[in-house]
Amino acid sequence: MSRTKLIAGNWKMNTNFSEAQILCSALKKTIRPSATVEVAVCPPFTHLSIVNTLLNGTQIMLGAQNIHQDKKGAFTGEVSAQMLKDTGVEYVIIGHSERREHFGETNTIVKEKALRCLELGMKPIVCVGEVLSERKSGNYLNIVEEQVREGLSREMDPKKLVVAYEPVWAIGTGETASPEQANEVHGHIRSILTEYFGSESAQEIRIIYGGSMKPSNADELLAQPEVDGGLIGGASLNAEDFCAIVTAGEKQ
Ligand code: PGA
């Protein structure tokens, strides 16, 4: 089963307007339409509109880094699914470990956010991953399994779902899961997806890897049968590096 890979850049709380413009114009020059790799960038909320305009006419898709779980209302400072949809967003990162750690997002909240996103036809990138102590204790598969089981529900449309495995100990640390470590967890995630959505649908769901993916390790990570792309933090802020990862995806 060949799944279209997804390479998504998570800019986090980085870039000012002019840096975003420079990054977009470099991506626009280099990234060509591809039948095997989809590319998305997830800038901060304030840049969504301008990035959408700048990437107009390319196949690079727009993603957001978060969403609120309620449809609307008195939630000062929050952004709803409809607002993102109206801004041209196609992908939404949900339950990133930084949101779980610093903003108290639980699996239940992750599920609600993913449902809001799906209701409007956007695609959630649901992030899961263990912290270092859980990796060391050997309990990591159970931790990730719980996040997947509680963060997803069987009523979700599998065609629109993306899961990102991001071991927390590899995010922004320069340390990467080995290709075998990534593949093992991805395979485990797929077995839960199979139980939830049936084998045929589960085979179509992209499970992407995040955690210090860079040009020097992208080839071997993306060559793994269960690794269907990458969620790229630091390296997505450098156009050359990000484009090299996209090229690595196209080679697989
Ligand atoms: P990193 O971040 O590539 O800088 O490790 C990945 C992520 O947090 O999505």
Image (cartoon, helix red, strand yellow):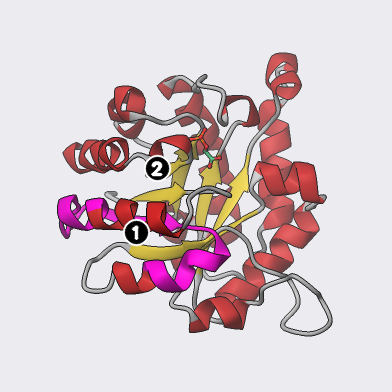
Name the outermost residue toward the front: 18
**Along the polypeptide, which appears first: circle 2 or circle 1?**
1
- Residues under labels 2 and 1: Cα distance? 14 Å
Within the magenta stretch, is there residue 35? yes
Residue 120, percent across and down? 55, 81
Residue ID at (55%, 29%):
172
Residue kind at label 2, given as amino acid type: Ser
Residue 111, percent across and down? 71, 62
Residue 3, percent across and down? 31, 52
Residue ID at (56%, 74%):
118
Q: Nearer the viewer, mark 2 or mark 1?
A: 1
Which residue is the site of mark 2?
236
Residue 159, percent across and down? 44, 67
Q: Is mark 2 within 8 Å of ligand 1?
A: yes
Residue ID at (66%, 77%):
80
Residue ID at (65%, 71%):
115
Which region is colored magenta? 26-51
